[in-house]
Image (cartoon, rainbow, N blue to C red):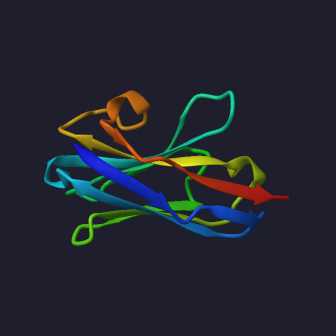
Amino acid sequence: QVQLVESGGGLVQAGGSLRLSCAASGRTFSTFAMGWFRQTPGKEREFVAAIRWSASVTYYADSVRGRFTISRDFAKNMVYLQMNSLKPEDTAVYYCASKMGFTMVLSTPASYDSWGQGTQVTVSS
């Protein structure tokens, strides 16, 4: 099992930037990919971005492509989400997730094995 802890959320004005971090511990050597999802009250958890751990291939939701960047630090077992040009509709709780073993689908929550506790991001207009 992998343990995940997110940090870096907060309140920012529209157009601003935030950087989320996710620290992974435990059986990280089996990690195939890491992802970021977000959720607002009453809505399903939504895919934001994912990165294949060894290949560093990245995937993005259309709503954030060009504004958000996912990256990882192998040595530190960290995943980051750099969020620029933030919009009020980006307001959500952001979750880090990890997937052990191969999968073709990285955009659905059901593909992931472990989740962090979430960090709140609020973008004011």
The image position of residue 46, as x and y in percent, is 55, 36
Total residue callouts: 0
Residue 95 vs residue 59, the one in the foreground: 95
Q: Residue at x 62, y 66 (%)?
A: 84
Q: Residue at x 71, y 70 (%)?
A: 16
Residue 110 vs residue 9, the one in the foreground: 9
Q: Is residue 124 above or below residue 112?
A: below
Q: Determine the image quadrant of residue 104.
A: top left
Is 105 situated left or right of 38 in this image?
A: left
Q: Is residue 63 above or below residue 75?
A: above
Is 34 situated left or right of 25 in this image?
A: right
Is 75 situated left or right of 71 in this image?
A: left
- Looking at the image, the residue that sits furthest to the left is 29
Quadrant into which the N terminus falls: top left
- Looking at the image, the residue that sits furthest to the right is 125
The image position of residue 6, as x and y in percent, is 46, 57
Q: Residue at x 20, y 57 (%)?
A: 54
Is 98 situated left or right of 108 in this image?
A: left
Quadrant into which the C terminus falls: bottom right
The image position of residue 105, as x and y in percent, is 33, 33
The image position of residue 35, as x and y in percent, is 40, 47
Q: Determine the image quadrant of residue 8.
A: bottom right
